[in-house]
Image: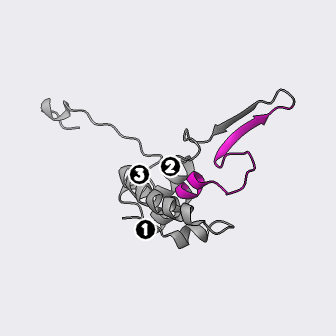
Amino acid sequence: MSYATLEDVESRITRTLSEDEESVATNLLDDAAVIIDAYNAKASDAAKLTVSCRMVIRALGDGEMSGIPMGASQGSMSGLSYAQSWTLGSGGSVGELYLSKQDKDILGRANSIGSYSPVQGMTGVVP
């Protein structure tokens, strides 16, 4: 079960998806739902829709051969000897579904910190 439709994805990009991309996007939307639920299944429906679309659009790319991977936060190019280097913002790779830092913020658990001690109840002292 996905949280977004192909129409949701197409409404957020400036082009129409090809038939092949539509097939891939449908599967990616299902995969994105699994990743989102693993991160925070209790996120709002609007957050899940937004993040699903963002993940799929990053994986599909912008459809242009700009040479700059979608989601890149840093990059460099050289000239004659040709060298190219890109850093993706959240550790994902081009064509891969991943949650960016902003996606995690949208889903609502990015800054949660906690701990649990398995021996806490064994001491007889209640904090």
The secondary structure type at the circle numbered 2 is loop
Which residue is the extreme one toward the front? 20
Kind of residue at disc 1: Asp
| Residue depicted at 80% across the width and 30% down the height | 82
Q: Is residue 71 above or below residue 125?
A: below
Kind of residue at disc 2: Leu
- The x, y position of residue 53, in whole percent, is 53, 62
Which residue is the extreme one toward the top? 81
Identify the mark at residue 45; answer none if there is no mark: 1
The secondary structure type at the circle numbered 1 is helix
User: Quick one: quadrant of the C terminus?
Assistant: top left
Tell me, yes or no, whether the highlighted magenta stretch contains residue 15: no
Q: Is residue 33 left or right of residue 120?
A: right
The secondary structure type at the circle numbered 3 is helix
In primary-sequence order, the first of circles 2 and 3 is 3
- The x, y position of residue 85, in whole percent, is 71, 33
What residue did someone put label 3 on?
Answer: 35
Front in this rendered view, residue 109 or 18: 18
* Labels 2 and 3 touching (C-beta < 8 A): yes
Cα separation, mark 3 vs mark 1, equals 14 Å
- The x, y position of residue 31, in whole percent, is 42, 55
Identify the mark at residue 97; answer none if there is no mark: 2
* Labels 1, 2: front one: 2
